[in-house]
Amino acid sequence: MTENATSAVKKQGSMKYVVILALSAGMAGLLYGYDTVSISGAIEFLRQAYNLSAGLQGLVISSIMIGGVVGVGFSGFLADKIGRRKVLLIGAACFFFAALWSAFTYTPWTLIAARIVGGVGIGLASALAITYITECAPAKYRGTLSSAYQLLTILGIFLTNVINFGIANAGSLDWGINSGWRWMLGIGCIPAAIFFLALFLSPESPRFLIQSGREEEGFAILEKIGGTDEARREVADVKASIERDKNGKLTDLFKKPLLIPFLIGLLLAAFNQVGGQNAVSYYGPTMFKAALGNNIPNVEFLCSSLVGLVELIFTVVGMALIDKAGRKPLLVTSAAGMGVFAAIMAFAFHANIGWLVVAGACGFIACFAFGLGPVTWVMIPELFPTYMRGRASGLCTVLLWGINFCVGQFTPMMFEGWGGSGTFIFWMIMDFIGAISIAKFAPETKGKTLEEIQALWTK
């Protein structure tokens, strides 16, 4: 151990410091939330500006997931080579450039190209933000702090809904078709710049530093987080874990004991998306306009803002419960609740009850927000050892983004072919399957250190 690490002067940890680190990395969620909703506000203007078919509407929205899959696919490998922080900085820079480019495009194909670049940035950041927080946070607060990513995602969704509403009301329909959507997409460069600056001023993950042979730097960060005694214990645990796993390789994921957590991670990633919440996030304004008509100007943006506010409130509820109620109960209740509200929305579309569509969407998103939304991102990195965490989390997130692409691409076609009722019956079935699968296979990781979680797979 280094001289600093064995100093007789013991230091106390700083919760303020670790919260700052969590919020800095969690800004990746703000980018993801911003993009999710900015395009949902712009898509109707873009449809009219470029006479987009249902398939091309889907591609404009889902193209960011193409880049996202590339980003998350490389994120883990890059993170294990150059560090979590550097990859997050690259992601922020990609999104900053893509947001500005999107605002100055003049064909749907150049917009799609810009969104693919932005997707690479968000993919890099989304996979590693939670990994970074997980490796910094004390075990008893890890769930709450890791939820900062989802909280900032939902904050981004809510704020962007409000911004979309303001921009839509700032001018005529023709102004919106020609210029309004450019503002909706271009403003994304602001949170990207804030994210870059926050990460620039933050340290590297202490676990990555220790794994890379920079023990003194890693100890200094852990000491700031949890105090001297806790830092010594953490360093010893990480070094023991590294020694145990020093001959590990990617193929370890496909055999025991890591095959089990890898399959669970894929399960969680799949049901984070296949439940259908992003159908509401991406196409909420279009959906609400169809359900409520044109009697109230821009009512679709107002309803989307309401749904965003509900999602923000229930994300805070989930953050308050995740380290108390536990991960698994929240996941199961969340998926089952989404199934119930998907059924309500299917009925509302069938009976043509506009207000019930909006109320059902609020309940549907609320259930996602306290469970599947934050808990998925917290649990996936918890499942894996330090040497594999970046790569395994990245591969799980590839699946998540791949399904996200399918939701964005095919939802307009589902609505066109099945109607709102048939579409939400499909989401209902997926949600109930998710609740049953998670109840059967997911473990409880609440309150366990990362090393204790690894012991679950070797019993």
Image (spheres, rainbow, N blue to C red):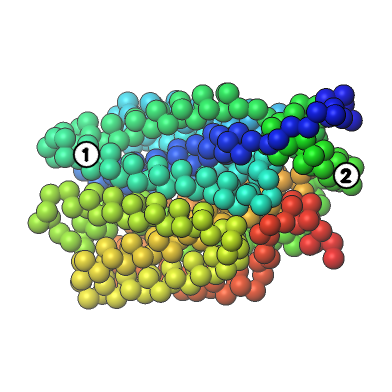
- Contact? badges 1 and 2 (CB < 8 Å): no
**Where is residue 174 drawn, in percent x and y?**
14, 36
Closer to the chain start, of discs 1 and 2, is 1
**Where is residue 397 drawn, in percent x and y?**
59, 49
Residue at horizontal 52 percent and vertical 45 percent from the top:
148
Residue at horizontal 66 percent and vertical 52 percent from the top:
140
Quarter where residue 70 is shown: top right
- Category of crowding for the residue at label 2, using alpha-carbon neighbours closer than 10 angstroms: few (below 14), some (14–19), many (at least 20): few
For mark 2, what is the residue? 240
**On the rendered structure, is 445 left or right of 103?**
right
**On the rendered structure, is 15 left or right of 37?**
right
Determine whether 343 is above or below 54 in the image.
Answer: below
- Nearer to the camera, 70 or 149: 149
- Nearer to the camera, 151 or 368: 151
Determine whether 307 is above or below 169 in the image.
Answer: below
For mark 1, what is the residue? 166
**Where is residue 199 drawn, in percent x and y?**
57, 28
**Residue at disc 2, secondary structure:** helix
Determine whether 129 is above or below 327 in the image.
Answer: above
**On the rendered structure, is 233 left or right of 77?**
right
In the rendered image, the quadrant that contains the N terminus is top right
**Residue at disc 1, secondary structure:** helix
